[in-house]
Amino acid sequence: MLQPENQPKKYQHLFTGIDTGKIRIPQFQRDFVWSKEQTARLIDSIIKGFPIGTFILWQTNDSMRAVRAIGNAQLPLIRNGETVQYVLDGQQRITSLYGVQKGIVCTREGKEIDYKDICINLDVDPDADEQIVYTEPTEDYTFISVYQLLNGDLTSFVNEYSGSTHLKRIDTYRKRLTGYDFSTIVMDAYPIDIACEVFTRINTGGTDLTLFEIMVAKTYDIDQNFDLANEYNWLLDNHDAPGKDLEDADYDTIPESTVLQCIAAHLVGFVRRKDILKLDKYAVIKEWPTVKEGIFAAVDYLRSYLRILVSQLLPYNALLVPFSYFFIKNNFNPPSHQQDQKLQQFFWWASLSSRYTGGAEGKLANDFKRMDAILAGEKPSYIGEELRLTVDDVKGQWFSASDAFCKAIICLLVYHQPRSFQNNSMVKIDNSWLRRADSKNYHHFFPKSYLRKKGVEDWKANSVSNITIVDDYLNKRRIGGRAPSAYMKEFVDANPNLDEAMKTHLIMDLRDFGVWNDDYERFIAKRTQVIFDELSKRLP
């Protein structure tokens, strides 16, 4: 890797580079946000010979996703393999200078901003301490726009500005602007991850580039019309063309990082950051359709076989990675009966064992080996990672909608297709109400407010075994904070199939479960045992 090289550039050199596409602004830079006042001060500093900071450019043959327009100025495309310099530091300054030279018009927050308005006061001595550059002319002085100064010819100046003092100052300002030595450092042939690290360190906003942003930049390809950011958005919501997408499947909360892991799992079998950064651009582009189909196949399986109808129910988003790996290796065929049994066992083992709470990247590599065993008709090994679940583990689990163990329990409840207490209809489940523990669809069968009045502490009342899934209306309007014996009596006459409905909530007998005499201890003991037995049947 070469050392950075100082390469001073003149005004025209910089902007010829932008005009020809040789100097570009990568898409991961923030939007152009400088005000006209900031741009005017920048021009003022250059005219007075003040230092304005250094531009840092990354020179590479890699084609990256870059800004295609600055205001009304369209920037040219470049072909793969051409040497380009991407702006890592100085974007706001270089864009401001370019905007003034091109006379761009921007629209920001519904307001039009015309950079042709920025002008120089010709009535002030160039070496005076007072302000020379203004955001727009006033009636008190004689002005020339910076755009006109840089793009006009001497004949037009002579005709418009007859005074020798004004013409002399125009010549002085023009020479100072076009002759200014802009401090520029060029980083030649640095790897993209190092270039992005440099970008992160020199930008003081405090927001690091995400791995996805880096990979979007790295895999961008004009010739093949590939933009990973667009592909991800289309994966979530393919609204521009017919075809399935994750939104249609209620799996649109799958994050970018999981998709990157699915790509790396398929290509190299490892999903660490360093493995993803080393992925070959053209391999990613070539295999993207395969990975996408693998994700769809994994989602179809989770929805159909495990009845996990929405992505917000997944204990870990990372679970999608080994399942997509399996289906790609299985040529997208549905699993055999034996494969299905082993896949379901893996799901419950991973979900209940805090599998991906920490160190998920390394654990996924081992889980791909488990998928390989299932594909080969063998039993995956869990030696040394056995899950020894107890009844007390379930009973004592504090309910949290973001906890993987609790989500696994909710997945179990959803698998049994819970029905309404009131009319035996299927309870609607979607991503919109599964994010928060205080959602009105998560119902404490023995309401916490009722138990609090009875002296039951919140840690005991909030057991995951006390959670049922009901519709929003029922929770707010019919149940509230009443005793179970009170509100359940209202459903006995309304729903002749109430006993069957309660079984879909793993509440097998209302009397035996202590509901009619409001016996919370008995209810929790009985329901915990049923949940535990159901989970035990599913574990390897």
Image (spheres, rainbow, N blue to C red):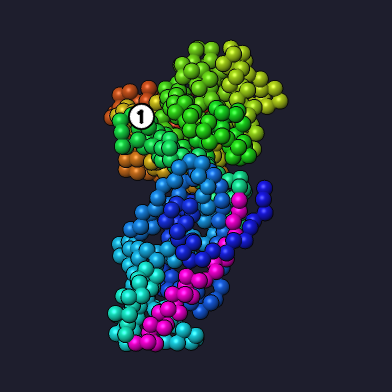
Please tell me which residue lies in front, 148 or 285.
148
167 part of magenta stretch: yes
- In the rendered image, is residue 98 in sight? yes
In which image quadrant can residue 443 be found? Answer: top left
Please tell me which residue lies in front, 361 or 342.
361
In which image quadrant can residue 367 be found? Answer: top right
What residue do we see at 38% from left, 37% from top?
234
From the viewer's perspective, is residue 345 above or below residue 80?
above
Please tell me which residue lies in front, 389 or 495.
389
Q: Residue at label 1?
A: 244
Q: Position of residue 81 (x, y in %)?
A: 51, 41
Residue furthest toward the right? 384
Q: Position of residue 514 (x, y in %)?
A: 47, 30
Tell me the magenta residue range.
Answer: 163-188
Q: Position of residue 251 (x, y in %)?
A: 42, 34
Identified by mark 1, the residue type is Lys
Crowd rating for badge 1 (residues with CA inside 10 Å; few <14, some 14–19, many 20+): some
Please tell me which residue lies in front, 536 or 77.
77
What residue do we see at 55% from left, 27% from top?
266
